[in-house]
Amino acid sequence: MRLTGFLFSLLILLFGSYDISRGSELQSASAAYKEGDYDTALQTFKPLAEKGDMIAQFNLAKIYREGKGVPKDYKTAVKWFSLSAEQSNAKAQYHLGVAHSFGLGVVPDYKIALKWFNRSAEQGNTFSQYHLSRLYYLGNGVPEDKVYAHMWANLAFSSGFGMAQQLRQLLTEKMTSNQIERAQELARECFKKNYKGC
């Protein structure tokens, strides 16, 4: 019994120290990145990203997308954003939506962009909510739908994303009072459901 307790404590100590060590490495890599020491940031993020750390994967993707210390490489950025996004990183999902909307490292595909914006928006990401509004407004990847466009713009604006107010106002000018009322009702329902299944 004592041996089992000892092994259990040892495992917690080992895994706990790994988490602390990982957190410390991520913190030092982030600090290096902010200070412009991109080589150190890259050398620290890459092994963690290769081990599956979604935060390191996201940061590595940003390094390649921005060309910080490496040549700008959208394809490599998409690879790392994808790995992070698959682990439910809302920011990575948003950036994948942008990549697929504008063809950054991939062939433009609004349906794939819609998928990633939806996943991110369900986690409350206001940038993704705004982009969903635009997709519905323009009919990119989905049938044009001013009601859903207004709903997503309303949610993004209520979460503090100022640009959504302009889009919401533009939509309001093109909608009937019944459509606006329906959009507001959908926004309230979506908020109550914590953005899931909207």
Image (spheres, rainbow, N blue to C red):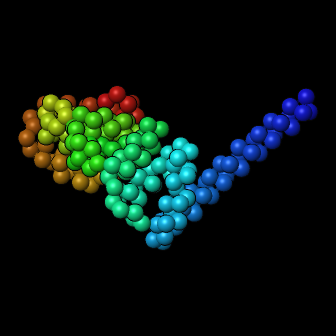
Closest to the observer: 121 or 185?
121
- Which residue is at 31% across, 34% downward? 115
Seen in the picture, residue 50 relative to 24 is either above or below; the reply is above
Residue 13 relative to residue 58: left or right: right
Q: Position of residue 194 (x, y in %)?
A: 40, 34
- Location of the C terminus by quadrant is top left
The quadrant in which residue 69 appears is bottom left
Q: Position of residue 185 (x, y in %)?
A: 25, 31
- Which residue is at 33% across, 32% downward? 190
Q: Position of residue 51 (x, y in %)?
A: 56, 45
The quadrant in which residue 62 appears is bottom left
Closest to the observer: 10 or 149?
10
Residue 13 relative to residue 54: left or right: right
Seen in the picture, residue 136 relative to 168 is either above or below; the reply is above
Q: Among all residues in the image, which is located at the extreme front?
A: 71
Q: Position of residue 24 (x, y in %)?
A: 62, 58
Q: Let me know if residue 102 appears in the view.
A: yes
Closest to the observer: 195 or 35?
35
- Which residue is at 49% across, 60% downward? 42
Closest to the observer: 16 or 166?
16
Q: How many marks?
A: 0
Q: Let me know if residue 131 appears in the view.
A: no
- Which residue is at 86% across, 34% downward? 5
- Location of the N terminus by quadrant is top right
